Amino acid sequence: MADVTSWREAGSAAPAPGASGASGASGASDAGARALARDVRAGLQSTPRTLPCKYFYDDHGSRLFERITRQPEYYQTRTEQALLEEHAGEVIERVAPRELVELGSGVGRKVRLLLDAMRARGLLRRCLLLDINALYLRRSVAQLAAEYPGAEVRGLHGDFQADLQRLGPGGGRLVLLLAGTLGNIVPRRLPEFLSQVRALLVPGDGFLVGVDLVKDRARLEAAYNDRAGVTAEFNRNILAVLNRELRADFDLGAWEHVAFYDEDEAWIEMRLRSAADQRVTLPALGLACDFRRGDEIRTEISAKYTRASLEARLAGSGLRLSRWWTDAGQRFALALLQPDVAPHDGSDLPPGAAGFPSGSNG
Ligand code: AVJ
């Protein structure tokens, strides 16, 4: 719901309608705080107990994720980086985008490979970053604006699922969802999400997705149980977010990190397991939760795909698999998705775009 999710523009002169100015250290606006309260209440009262993984990414959590990407067991980031280095040129050739939109941009390092390829071809007009963390977003926007002076760089502070429609109609647009973040969407809900992305595109536009592939259990589980314990700290940090934002009293030392591969679902599941019988109070919610030793809270799913299982989820979404690149070890893939048919009534084409499937509104 749009009204409960903060949506601010960073690094642009004009504030978004309803913008409430710079956010505090936590990055939480009033609307964001209400959404957090509602999500946490629902999650802790459901069976099994869950917390939405987007709440990992406060400033500390975003930094911890950056550290995860440098762990030897976490093959995803470096594999995707190599794939982008190799294939960014071909992606840009195919789509010829004027506008790049990155969903869940984080530190926004990989986006440069695509921006460089766009600039080299004289295509680059606009870059839009969307992220849940306001601090990282502002930093990335400022850096990219300085590095690409010819481009209009904007940041949209929000949730890439809830706030997607706010991007408005496309035309000459390439949307990115990298790092395997697609895996955070429950697979059975993926077709719906893909349809929503499709609605932002016109024929010829593209959606480039980083896909973590199904592989042997040992390698997958190692990536979420790094020896240095960074993923464990990242997982527990969600409790620190609740302590700060909801005045909860989670004892971080009383929760164990759990991450395992569920082969039937083809996803990694992360949980926090109570190491003791304990009561946690969340005064901001008027809620107290009792946990027995061994009780768990699910904090994340990270779904893994094969080419076939991803293609199966494309059915009915209006997107087709246009290109598929993998590394030699078949660990990670880049999938280029494109609208599969012309719209029936042309209503999602920008004015004047008819007959010029891509890039006509640059
Ligand atoms: C940012 C969602 C791609 O699922 O691998 C890393 C998050 N969680 N280690 C992933 C994460 C634990 C990551 N994504």
Image (tube, grey):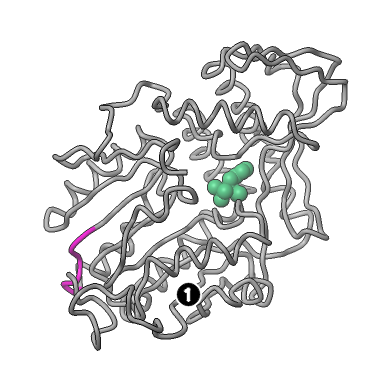
Above or below — where is 257 with respect to 121? Answer: above
| Bounds of the magenta segment | 121-126
Question: Which image quarter: residue 175?
Answer: bottom left
| 141 and 24: which is toward the camera | 24
* Residue 199 spot, x, y in % from top left: 41, 68
Is disc 1 surrounded by few (<14), some (14 to 19) or many (20+) residues within 10 Å? many
Please check the rendered image and state whether residue 15 is part of the magenta-colored stretch, yes or no: no
Residue 19 shown left or right of residue 65 in the figure: left
Q: Which residue is mark 1?
A: 337
Residue 190 shown left or right of residue 12 in the figure: right
How many marks the image carries: the answer is 1
* Residue 210 spot, x, y in % from top left: 52, 63
Q: Is mark 1 within 8 Å of ligand 1?
A: no
* Residue 74 spot, x, y in % from top left: 61, 49
What residue sits 38% from the left and 36% below the top? 6
What residue sits 48% from the left and 30% below the top? 58
